[in-house]
Amino acid sequence: MTKLDQIKAAESQLLLSTYERNPILFVGGEGVHIIDENGTRYLDLLSGIGVNALGYGSPVIEQAIARQSRALIHTSNLYYHEGQAELALRLTERTGLDRCFFANTGTEAWEGALKLARAYAGLRRSEGANLGTKFLALEHSFHGRTFGSVSTTHKAKYREPFAPVVPGVEFVRFNDVADLRAKFSNDVCAILVESIQGEGGIRPLSQEFFAEARALSSSTGALLIADEIQAGMGRTGKWCAYQHYGIPGAPADRSSSGGWIQPDVTTLAKPLAGGIPLGAVLCTEEAARAIHAGMHGTTFGGGPLACAVAIAVIDHIEQQNLLQHATEVGGYFLERLRNLAARHDSIVDVRGKGLMIAAELDSAELAKLTVAEMLNRRILINCTSDTVLRFLPPYILERTHVDEAIDALDVIFTQHAVAHNALPAAGGQ
Ligand SMILES: Cc1ncc(COP(=O)(O)O)c(C=O)c1O
């Protein structure tokens, strides 16, 4: 029995069967490559689902962990440590928001944002405002697996087994401004968006929809909450994907402070601490009025270790100009995928920003086969929303890696087309 077989057998007895894992045992990594037990290197274009922004074996992360773990790993939030304010300063400067709460994961950050919205609406009601408790979430949204998060996640398969979920959520058709207007009212305490939906298939909000969501929420005092857990922290070439949504000619008030559509609240996680779990909720000074001591908290969130690593990751991204790099290499990736799409009818759309990229195929079967064939060629990607190949590589990806992936996809689609055309026509003799 191989070591992998032993682990598989043990897990099948001992773990809840939440995951359908690929049969590979990873033991190490270097740069954009992850390495299995036999020393085989895989080009990782998924980076642990958008987490390992600096790739594997980053000395920056290694040194930050070593330094901080020698000094102090955990304090709880009953005491001060050096990391939270220093990290919060970096995050507020980069998001255009004022205050920060640290959590451990994406879903936990999202729960914090939902609670903040309900608490803020309650505060505003106590001050005489007409504001309800309803959330407007979007079709195709994904916000995580805890109760508030699944309740605001669109796909029924994530919610229904756990019914009843948190009440007071209505879904708006994606990018449908008329539907948003129809469903918005004073009952709404927050509009919830991902400016570029991740699990939903790398779908960007339209400028018009995002601007309308901002205008409607501002009109009543409801919050506009942008989930940047997958798209944020530089993945799209900007610190937050909402920063791609400019407001031409808008006055420099709170809703356009950085020249972009500014949400009242945003959530960050995945690449925030380069692989060490850490989430964050960022909000305006105004929304922060709703939270006082004892209302919300966490034992581990914002611990010294995670904060020290996040600070090192942010500083490294800046020093190495990785936002610019993600923009350039991502642009090249998109261009090469578009050229590929021009030659393969099975690719029906190519979209994305920076290193958050998708190629949508014409069948779920082909998408599944492509992921498996890429794995056979030692390249990791995945498929989301059935037909969408998703690429979330580390920010240190180079053009040569893109070429390697495109060449592999080219061979796979060519072989598929040949095999497909060789099949006898359905209903034929
Ligand atoms: C946009 C978005 N929000 C929330 C989450 C949940 O994050 P986590 O898995 O860290 O709880 C995810 C995870 O994929 C995500 O993509």
Image (cartoon, rainbow, N blue to C red):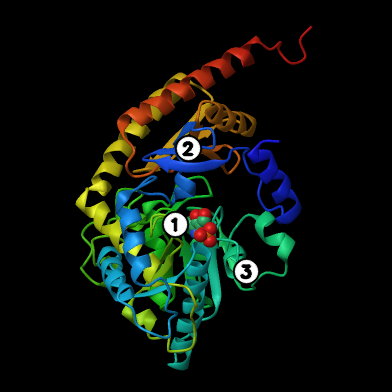
Residue in the image at 46% along x and 43% along y: 28
Place residue 418 in its image quadrant. Answer: top right
Q: Amino acid at mark 2?
A: Ile
What residue would you read off at disc 2? 35
Report crowding for label 1: few under 14, some 14 to 19, many 20 or more residues within 10 A (C-alpha). many
Residue 277 location, x and y as percent? 46, 62
Residue 5 location, x and y as percent? 69, 39
Which quadrant holds the C terminus?
top right
Instruction: Kindly tell me whether mark 3's CB lies below 8 Å from ligand 1.
Output: no
Asked if residue 262 can be seen in this view, the reply is no
Which quadrant holds the N terminus?
top right
Q: Amino acid at mark 3?
A: Phe
Under circle 2, the secondary element is: strand
Count of numbered marks: 3
Mark 1 or 3: in front is 1
Q: Earlier in the sequence, mark 1 or mark 3?
A: 3
Report crowding for label 3: few under 14, some 14 to 19, many 20 or more residues within 10 A (C-alpha). some
State the residue in front, 232 or 350.
Answer: 232
Q: Earlier in the sequence, mark 3 or mark 2?
A: 2
Q: Amino acid at mark 1?
A: Lys
Asked if residue 150 can be seen in this view, the reply is yes
State the residue in front, 277 or 105.
Answer: 277
Residues at marks 3 and 2, CA–CA distance in whole angstroms: 35 Å
Place residue 16 in its image quadrant. Answer: bottom right
What residue would you read off at disc 1? 270
Instruction: Kindly tell me whether mark 1's CB lies below 8 Å from ligand 1.
Output: yes
Q: Earlier in the sequence, mark 1 or mark 2?
A: 2
Residues at marks 1 and 2, CA–CA distance in whole angstroms: 21 Å
Residues at marks 1 and 3, CA–CA distance in whole angstroms: 19 Å
What residue would you read off at disc 3? 147
